[in-house]
Amino acid sequence: MAFLWAGVAHAGEAAGEAPATNDAAPAGDADAAGERHDRNAPGDYHAQAASDIVVTAPFKRDVGTLLSGASVVSGETLTRELRPTIGETLARQPGVSSTSFGPNASRPILRGFQGDRVRVLTDGIGTFDVSSTSADHAVVINPLTADRIEVLRGPSALLFGSSAVGGVVNVIDSRIPRRVPDEPIHVDAIGTYGTAANERSVGGAVESPIGDKFVVHFDGSYSKTGDLDTGGHILTPALRAQAAANPDPEIAELADLKGKLPNSAARTWEVAGGAAVITDTGNFGVSVSRYDSLYGVPIRYSLDPDIEAEAVRLDVKQTRVDFRGEVETGGGFLQSIKLRGGYADYQHSEIEDTGEVGTTFYSQGWEGRLELVQQERGGWRGAIGGQMMIRDFNVIGEEKFLPKNETQQYGLFTLQEFDLGAVKVEAGGRFEHSVISADADADLGNPAYHRTFDALSASLGAGVDIVQGWRVGLNLSRTERAPSADELFANGPHAGTQAFEIGDPTFGKEKSWGLEATLRGKGEGYSINASVFHSWFDNYIYETATGEIEDDLPVYRFAQGDARYYGFEVEGSATLAHIGQTTIVADALADYVRAKIKHDGPVPRIPPLRVLGGIEAQAERITGRVEVEWTDDQKRVTEFETPTEGYTMVNASLAFKPFGSANSTSIVLSANNIFDVVARRHASFLKDYAPLAGRDFRITTRINF
């Protein structure tokens, strides 16, 4: 199906592969976007990769030809939207919101899906962190190191795992070099300053060839922020009214808390090195990286004088090893064989405001992918492959909420495409065997568990060219997802989320049918992309507040029920005028999702309707942009969930490229939330206690030579 096809496209591209064609160029000549180049071609290959708009590999595809929602963020757009977290960096893309658990732990939400249903990848494999376990856990990706970021919305990326029913975010970097640069040394550096959090960020990467086939890479980054400036009061009007009426003077003072968001400062650094051998018939490379971050979690204030609010900080560390390889077969049924893998040792400690470590999380993970890409024959092309993932996970401390557990996943997948002229048919499938086990834990009161699940997903889709430049597509998918260890075994207080979380070890597989229709049009001076989707779930797993209090924390319980998700995304752009050497372009997007659990009301934390429109003046060296983002109220809430007021933000930016579009060197000045409005994301667990950034003036400088 189209959704699985697009998933393979990202899988290959993550590894930097090139399109499979009958006259394919050597494997070593693919850049981050999958374009083939001469190994020693002149020019700024980083800029070439970033400016490419295609989602490729094993087949070269323009975003406009995919049969599911997709976005590519690169170049000037990535520089302008760059934030300390991947969630905030992507939050203005169609169909994308963010968990916004404060400014330091913000994970992407795709079509209302979050957590385990959205896979965040680094060059095609997982991040090996625990960000899908809980909203307060940061994604171990620093956007400063990204060359480009690709988003597949919907179940279009299930080839990366049966859990990715919401979609995939794939962050592509250059740590394992993809080609031999023509310069003796290539430097890419970036620096950012933002006023809202006194943000200071710097990053740099160096690549150099040693001989004509060996390339080395080194990069590093450092960022530091203070407490975030918000647009007004920290608490919502409803909580402020309750606080003001409280007889306890300390609680009453919370009604006037405004400006700085307490306990939201952060410090992060990362270093990495990589090397690759690149020949005319293949390539192989490895990289090693070290990530270290210390950040605060905004305080969930209690209006009960007998319950003390905690100011928790997380100290995160990860060491990671990656490898990637590709070899051309030289003919026959297969065009190429591709291998991608990685290992990481991760831990983080949750530090209480007394300085004591309350809980420590340990995770060791392996992931590997093998892809066999077929030669194109008479309009038929495809790929088959396998994937393995193993994670050992342990939580130690007085406030642990999970027993020691292990997750193993083994998958087989295929994607096939048939070009019938005006009609293209795509079919795919994935089988995944999961083994999830947990040790007996006397502290949590659980016995040993051993669960196995066999999940089968399949899809079928077709696209039709209706007139020149216009294409419609339809996808049908059937997916199955095994529950995660958290959904099965959670049973205890979690200081980071400031909640008491309870899972259910008897959960069965989550199953769904999905239908998506797309319309894409492109002509001289305009483009439009629209998607309408509907998913029906059996045994949908969700987490909801019960209204109970346990260990001075609100209780959140995982449950299963039948559910429906449906919505739309639309984006378009049009050239309004040409004034001398300047082009005036208008663009807009809108997205909406509605989700309901049968017999239990709305799904919690679903983003509301959003509309964003902008106008740009584009010249050779200067681009100016003004945009308005309107987000509706969200009043469809569960019993113990509060409504969220909508907001309107106005943003502006000015980008200067001194060497023109041929080089990515640039200076970007931006002003976000110009009118300093109070804004809260409904999808955030902390929305009533942690608003988004207020007025934020930013300057970002990128140097490339």
Image (cartoon, rainbow, N blue to C red):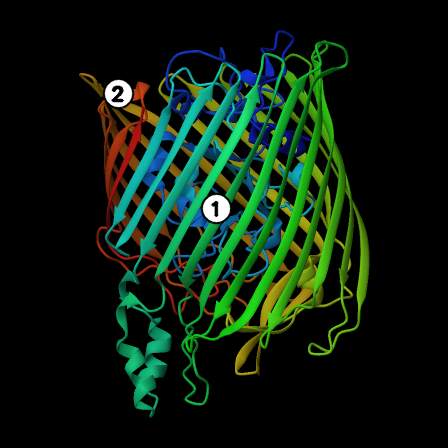
In the image, is 192 to the left or to the right of 176?
left
Q: Disc 1 marks which amino acid?
A: Ile
Foreground disc of the pair 1, 2: 1
Q: Quadrant of the C terminus?
A: top left
Label 1 – label 2 distance at C-alpha: 29 Å
Q: Quadrant of the N terminus?
A: top right
Q: Position of residue 673 (x, y in %)?
A: 26, 51
Looking at the image, which residue sits at the far front? 211
Looking at the image, which residue sits at the far bottom? 247
The residue at which mark 1 appears reads as 141
Vertical placement of residue 621 versus 83, above or below: above
User: In the image shown, does 286 or 251 lie closer to the viewer?
Assistant: 286
User: In the image shown, does 103 or 352 lie closer to the viewer?
Assistant: 352
Residue at (34% x, 50% y) in the render: 223
Quadrant in which residue 578 is drawn = top left
Q: Disc 2 marks which amino acid?
A: Gly
Vertical placement of residue 563 versus 651, above or below: below
First in sequence: mark 1 vs mark 2: 1
Element at badge 1?
Answer: loop
Vertical placement of residue 496 versus 95, above or below: below
Residue at (29% x, 78% y) in the render: 255
Q: Position of residue 554 (x, y in %)?
A: 54, 77
Local crowd size for mark 2, using a 10 Å CA cut-off: few (<14), some (14–19), many (≥20): some
Quadrant in which residue 353 is drawn = bottom left
Looking at the image, which residue sits at the far top? 23
Element at badge 2?
Answer: helix
In the image, is 134 to the left or to the right of 457?
left
The residue at which mark 2 appears reads as 660
